[in-house]
């Protein structure tokens, strides 16, 4: 079954009088447990596509279906609920809450979902171990390296046991070793948890981890790849 | 999920939002401290202003009651205070009976007849118009004068030539103890009568306007001097409690007399108090609005700085109302911190002006002739007002934070993530 399905999705940005067509009639299916790279040059629409899949934005045309539900009809609160329960995010700029510790950052989505304290502890500790940061749990983001922050972000994305994790240029701000470590963790957790991962990148070393590569150019999918 | 489980979820969430709010305030410590201090100074100013005006007005009122009017006065129906009439028809003919009746009431601490006359005091070098007051020297009503004696002795009831004058008046006229002065009064027949009196004592009540315009002499001598027979201008009553004024007044009503309350007799002060309060309410409003603008500005700046972070929180599934709650909690933290500091500063200031006072000088205090201002102004603790101001400050802070909170809650996650 498809975890995500996009049907004829378009997105246009208006900046003053200027109209930019970020996505043009895009259709795509992502299956459960996939490990998919979204590749293409800057401005090709990768980030916009991830934002639409992640219910962070609404398309101007077309439908985005997650687990069969057309989320384009959802209210802001319904979309927030869906993000909280079913979608994890990893951003290029790490995007941890700076005033919370690594542990608290991973715990936050579970708090939002009302997970019981004992289960929260168990899940957070397990994920901190899985990303190799159990000894950094009480450190705040500014006390962690870029690579460590991105590993915390990966743990946070997986905390609510989502159907899908979306990662936008997850290694762009990391050196080669840390980028490789982050990708290996994502790949391992994809296999262990069965969570689908879709990540945007234009780094050939990162693309190599993908089992499916979707190529984009000028707001359109030029090659949907094979799962 | 059970109601109990839902409740626990909400508490956990609220706790985490509180942690976020509290720690967010610690990010830009300088701005948080400055904002807290601004709130504190605003509230401290409000408390100080209100403590000051309450002290001034209440002090002036109590001085007037203590030295001039008492809590209740009984006068002949036709008596007009402004004329200081000595016409017999304007005076009480049987003051002793009224005093006896009033003194029998448990609410009445002291009751005494008094005779007022307009007069002129003259020395070889100078003369001055003032009020001559004939007093029952044994009455507790004049305890404030007794305790304000700075030289000589208080009057004896049978003293036929002695007077008490204020220290300030004595200095103005170059008089001292034992000196003779001429007093002239227009008596009940409309004739000017002059007498020579000896200064037996000097008092300093701390109220220059009183000390510079009052001459006291025994009632019997004043009655004889003004040809008022045994009559009195009024009976002055001091009560055990100001709150029992209405019941005492009601009990003492009788034909041919007017029974006046401290409020009736201090209209000027009461009206000044009310108009001052109205003015201070406006000032309070302005200060509170300034505090509100500072808070709104701080929170808006804080929201603008954290737009991307709010996008992250939205991406994690945090709803708009959670962001609203978080910002309201930040505002509450700022407000409570500022209010706590403001209370410390404001109450310290009020304590200072209450126990030490602000000297305003004799000239300034004497300028308010009808309002018995002391040469030192004292503040007063008004807990209800201070609590009300603190609450109003907190409420206005929360109101001011609604716009930034609403703004944050309306952010589209994708737009917020772009910064």
Image: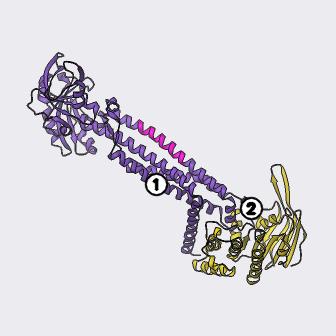
Chain colours: A yellow, B purple
Q: Is residue B151 visible?
A: yes
| Chain letter behind tag 1 | B
Q: In which quadrant of the rendered image does the N terminus of chain A lie?
A: bottom right
Instruction: Give the residue displayed 49% in from the left and 47% down from the top.
Output: B42
The answer to whether residue B135 is above or below residue A1 is: above
The circle drawn on residue B283 is none
In the rendered image, which residue does mark 1 sit on?
Answer: B341
Res. B381 in view: no
- Quarter the C terminus of chain A occupies: bottom right
Residue A114 versus residue B59 in the image, above or below = below
* Residue displayed at 82% across by 59% down: A60
> Closer to the camera, A146 or B372?
A146
Q: Tell me the crowding category of disc 2: few under 14, some 14 to 19, or many 20 or more residues within 10 angstroms, Cα based.
A: many
User: Does the magenta segment cover residue B393?
Assistant: no
**Residue at (63% x, 73% y) in the render:** A102
Who is closer to the viewer here, B324 or B148? B148
Q: Secondary structure at mark 2?
A: helix
Parent chain of label 2: B
Q: Is residue B34 left or right of residue A225?
A: left
Q: Quadrant of residue B246?
A: top left
Residues shaded magenta:
B275-291
Residue B284 is inside the magenta segment: yes
Q: Quadrant of residue B172?
A: top left
Point out the residue furthest to the left here: B158
As drawn, the label of residue B414 is 2
The furthest residue to the right: A222
Residue B175, placed above or below residue A64: above
């Amino acid at each position: 079954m498809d975890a995500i399905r996009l049907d004829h999705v378009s997105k246009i940005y208006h900046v003053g009088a200027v109209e930019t067509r970020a996505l043009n009639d895009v259709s795509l299916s992502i299956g459960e447990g996939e490990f998919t790279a979204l590749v293409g040059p800057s401005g090709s629409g990768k980030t916009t596509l991830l934002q639409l899949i992640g219910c962070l934005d609404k398309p101007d045309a077309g439908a985005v279906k997650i687990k069969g539900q057309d989320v384009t009809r959802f209210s802001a609160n319904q979309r927030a609920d869906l993000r909280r329960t079913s979608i994890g995010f990893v951003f290029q700029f790490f995007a941890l809450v700076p005033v919370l510790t690594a542990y608290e950052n991973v715990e936050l989505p579970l708090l939002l979902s009302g997970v019981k304290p004992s289960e929260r502890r168990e899940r957070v500790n397990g994920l901190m171990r899985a990303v190799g940061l159990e000894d950094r749990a009480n450190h705040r983001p500014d006390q962690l390296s870029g690579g460590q922050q991105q590993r915390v972000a990966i743990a946070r994305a997986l905390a609510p046991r989502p159907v899908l994790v979306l990662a936008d240029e997850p290694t762009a701000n990391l050196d080669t070793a840390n980028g490789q470590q982050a990708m290996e963790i994502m790949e391992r957790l994809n296999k262990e948890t069965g969570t689908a991962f879709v990540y945007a990148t234009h780094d050939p070393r990162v693309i190599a981890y993908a089992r499916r590569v979707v190529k984009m150019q000028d707001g359109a999918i030029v090659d949907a790849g094979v799962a | 999920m059970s109601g109990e489980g839902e409740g626990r979820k909400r508490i956990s969430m609220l706790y985490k939002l509180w942690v976020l709010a509290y720690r967010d305030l610690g990010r830009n410590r300088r701005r948080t401290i400055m904002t807290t201090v601004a709130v504190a100074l605003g509230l401290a100013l409000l408390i100080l202003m209100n403590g000051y005006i309450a002290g001034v007005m209440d002090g002036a009122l109590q001085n007037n009651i203590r030295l001039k009017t008492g809590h209740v006065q009984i006068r002949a129906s036709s008596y007009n205070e402004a004329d200081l009439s000595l016409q017999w028809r304007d005076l009480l003919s049987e003051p002793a009976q009224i005093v006896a009746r009033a003194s029998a009431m448990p609410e009445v601490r002291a009751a005494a007849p008094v005779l007022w006359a307009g007069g002129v005091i003259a020395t070889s070098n100078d003369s001055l118009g003032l009020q001559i007051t004939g007093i029952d020297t044994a009455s507790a009503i004049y305890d404030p004068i007794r305790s304000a004696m700075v030289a000589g002795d208080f009057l004896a009831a049978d003293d036929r030539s002695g007077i008490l004058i204020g220290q300030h008046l004595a200095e103005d006229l170059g008089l001292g103890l034992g000196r003779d002065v001429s007093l002239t009064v227009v008596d009940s027949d409309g004739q000017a009568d002059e007498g020579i009196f000896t200064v037996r004592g000097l008092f300093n009540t701390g109220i220059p306007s009183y000390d510079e315009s009052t001459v006291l002499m025994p009632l019997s001598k004043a009655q004889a001097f003004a040809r008022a027979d045994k009559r009195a201008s009024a009976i002055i009553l001091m009560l055990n409690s100001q709150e029992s004024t209405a019941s005492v007044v009601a009990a003492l009503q009788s034909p041919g007399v007017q029974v006046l309350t401290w409020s009736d007799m201090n209209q000027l002060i009461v009206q000044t108090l009310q108009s001052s309060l109205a003015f201070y309410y406006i000032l309070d409003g302005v200060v509170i609005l300034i505090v509100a603008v500072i808070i709104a500005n701080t929170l808006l700046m804080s929201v603008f700085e954290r737009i991307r972070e709010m996008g992250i929180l939205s991406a994690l599934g945090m709803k708009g109302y959670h962001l609203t709650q978080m910002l309201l909690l930040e505002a509450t933290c700022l407000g409570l911190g500022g209010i706590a500091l403001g209370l410390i500063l404001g109450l310290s200031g009020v304590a200072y002006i209450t126990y030490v006072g602000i000297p305003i000088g004799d000239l300034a205090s004497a300028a308010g002739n009808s309002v018995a201002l002391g040469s030192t102004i004292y503040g007063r603790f008004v807990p209800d007002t201070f609590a009300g101001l603190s609450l109003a400050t907190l409420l206005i802070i929360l109101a001011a934070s609604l716009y930034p909170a609403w703004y944050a809650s309306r952010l589209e996650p994708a737009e917020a993530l772009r910064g």
